[in-house]
Image (tube, rainbow, N blue to C red):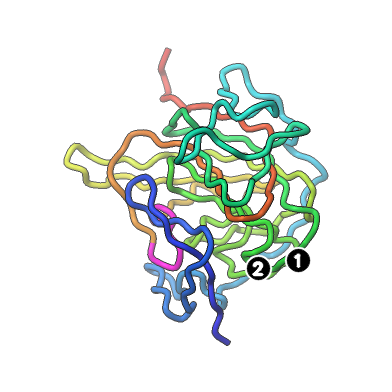
Amino acid sequence: MKKLLALTVVLIGGGVCLPTAAFAKEEKETPMLPGLPWRVHDAKRPVPRVVTPGETFSHGAPPPADAIVLFDGTDLSKWRSNKGPARWKVENGYMEVVKDSGNIFSIEEFADCQLHLEFATPARVDDKSQGRGNSGVFLFGGFEVQVLDSYQNWTYPDGQCGALYGQWPPLVNPVKKPGEWQSYDIIFEAPRWDDSGKLIKRAAVTVLLNGVVIHHRKEFMGETCHAELARYGKPRTRGPIMLQDHGNPVRFRNIWVRPLGDYDQP
């Protein structure tokens, strides 16, 4: 059966296309992933097995002394949109996506970093597949770790919660029920280019979702793109953290980040 993916392509960062909501492309037309027997968003790709996580892991974790707090539940002063101040809703200690208000970006930019955040997809289930609790966490302005309600909700494996969207499904599926708070703990290693602009090191990520390792130093094939092969954009040394407005009222709280330095530095 043909599956249609309804999404729009937009450009940010180094010329990267990101999904938002209204471009239709037949799955069979997507390209083959390099070195793999699967296409981008391949419905035939193996579905990660379900693992029931512990009741809590880093939920409510206080930031370390050297962390930069991006959201403490009170305001969006550390965030912006493409059109000025961030316009998501803030109440009861969390921020919530406001439909059509746009993606939001951290004002401060980062390279190698440790990121903690908590999210909750809507308790009320109104849709299925990619229309159910969809958002995303983008590192360095262009590398997405997917947010989705993947609790008993089938979608293409490289688009489920925890996927490096369009590239790698998570190792397992440890998501919680709709409406429950979940935690991401992400270690991001930024890409590197030489002085001539040649890519010499791919971006890589280690991700824990609700205390379960779903990626371990997994390299990104490129910056996130919908229904196309990922590619690396223009060389840069830093990029913002971006949270995606995909039209669903996903909530976020307790967001902090620690830039990572080198060994043997005073």
- Which SS class for mark 1? loop
Task: Sort mark 2 into few (<14), some (14-19) or many (20+) by Cα contacts within 10 Å.
Answer: some
x%, y% of residue 263?
42, 23
Q: Residue at x 58, y 70 (%)?
A: 156
Q: Amino acid at mark 2?
A: Ser
x%, y% of residue 49?
69, 65
Q: Amino acid at mark 1?
A: Gln
Residue extending farthest to the top is: 266
The mark that comes first in sequence, 2 or 1, is 2
Which residues are the magenta region?
221-229
- Which SS class for mark 2? helix
Residue extending farthest to the right is: 55
For mark 2, what is the residue? 129
Based on the picture, tell me whether residue 176 belongs to the magenta stretch: no
Residue 152: assigned label: 1
Locate residue 11 relative to residue 50 in the image: left or right.
Answer: left
Q: Residue at x 61, y 61 (%)?
A: 160
- Would you say residue 211 is visible in this rendering? no
Proximity of marks 2 and 1: CB atoms separated by less than 8 Å = no
In this rendering, is residue 87 above or below 231? Answer: above
In this rendering, is residue 182 above or below 262? Answer: below
Q: Residue at x 43, y 12 (%)?
A: 266
- Report how far apart the C-alphas of labels 2 and 1 lie in the structure: 10 Å
x%, y% of residue 201?
33, 45
